[in-house]
Image (cartoon, rainbow, N blue to C red):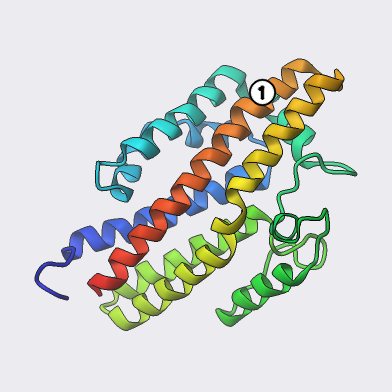
């Protein structure tokens, strides 16, 4: 390592923090919240982790995370579950959680981006847990891949393998730029539009729509902000190794 680079303890903390946050996001986007998940998501311990991701101490991310935690606290598990189902489940999904929908501009799945992420997973000996039954480019699946890549980078660094760590980070940076960061903002806009249209049309429970906009709207904003901060952190880590 260079003398002016991050010290070893800071690198290790950053690598472990990345794994923790991506694991958290994978869970949050994969399924409706249960009591255990809500407890983890609402924990103030995340503020310490998020401080690793911004030069100003992570205040922007921390503030956005507090908004997510506040929404969970306000609405609770039952309303969060109904909001999740309203947004992401059923025929004619109101809010598509798949990358291909946003990069193609059409409500189509199993498109080239789906194959691209499948190839990215396979290059590291991984596969989507729901391969064949759900498109591989679901935001939760992509976050899970990033979590596993973060784990590999952290493991390599712990073993003194800077080359292996850097290789995993370079692949993660490319995947983040090509995939997750390419549609996270649009997913949030799609959610806001679906909620607005439901209110205008008087469709569904107003309470469920309000919860969806509050909880998953905040989660989408946090996710997009985190992806941006993580890209910068990966660049710094690559430059350090």
**Total label count?**
1
**Does the rendering let one see residue 130?**
yes
Quadrant of the rendered structure where residue 142 is?
bottom right
Q: Secondary structure at mark 1?
A: helix
Horizontal side, residue 231 vs residue 74: left or right:
left
Q: Residue at x 21, y 58 (%)?
A: 10
Classify the position of the N terminus by image quarter. Answer: bottom left
Horizontal side, residue 25 vs residue 204: left or right:
left
Q: Residue at x 83, y 53 (%)?
A: 107
Please determine whether, in this image, residue 145 is positioned above or below residue 187. below
Q: Position of residue 210 (x, y in %)?
A: 68, 21
Q: Residue at x 70, y 60 (%)?
A: 103
- Give the residue at mark 1: 211
Q: Position of residue 65 (x, y in %)?
A: 44, 34
Classify the position of the C terminus by image quarter. Answer: bottom left
Q: Position of residue 55 (x, y in %)?
A: 25, 47
* Residue at the front extreme, as displayed: 105
**Does the rendering let one see residue 43?**
no
Q: Position of residue 151 (x, y in %)?
A: 43, 65
Please determine whether, in this image, residue 53 is positioned above or below residue 86. below
Q: Residue at x 54, y 57 (%)?
A: 181
Quadrant of the rendered structure where residue 79 is?
top right
Q: Nearer the viewer, residue 74 or 234?
A: 234
Please determine whether, in this image, residue 109 is positioned above or below residue 186. below
Q: Nearer the viewer, residue 103 or 130?
A: 103
Label 1: few (<14), some (14–19) or many (≥20) C-alpha neighbours in 10 Å: many
* Residue at the right extreme, as displayed: 91
């Amino acid at each position: 390592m260079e003398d002016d680079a991050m010290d070893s303890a800071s690198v290790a903390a950053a690598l472990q923090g990345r794994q923790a946050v991506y694991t958290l996001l994978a869970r949050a986007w994969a399924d409706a919240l249960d009591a255990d998940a809500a407890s983890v998501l609402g924990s103030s311990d995340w503020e310490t982790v998020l401080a690793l991701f911004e030069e100003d101490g992570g205040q922007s991310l921390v503030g956005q995370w507090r908004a997510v935690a506040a929404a969970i606290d306000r609405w609770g598990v039952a309303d969060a579950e109904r909001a999740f189902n309203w947004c992401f489940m059923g025929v004619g999904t109101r809010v598509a959680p798949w990358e291909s929908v946003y990069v193609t501009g059409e409500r189509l799945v199993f498109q080239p981006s789906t194959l691209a992420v499948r190839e990215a997973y396979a290059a590291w000996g991984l596969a989507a847990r729901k391969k064949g039954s759900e498109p591989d480019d679901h935001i939760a699946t992509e976050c899970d891949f990033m979590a596993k890549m973060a784990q590999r980078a952290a493991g390599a660094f712990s073993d003194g393998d800077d080359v292996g760590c850097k290789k995993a980070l370079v692949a993660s940076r490319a995947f983040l730029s090509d995939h997750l960061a390419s549609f996270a903002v649009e997913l949030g806009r799609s959610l806001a539009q679906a909620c607005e249209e439901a209110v205008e049309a008087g469709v569904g429970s107003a309470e469920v729509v309000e919860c969806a906009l509050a909880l998953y709207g905040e989660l989408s904003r946090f996710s997009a902000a985190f992806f941006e901060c993580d890209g910068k952190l990966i660049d710094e880590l690559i430059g350090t190794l």
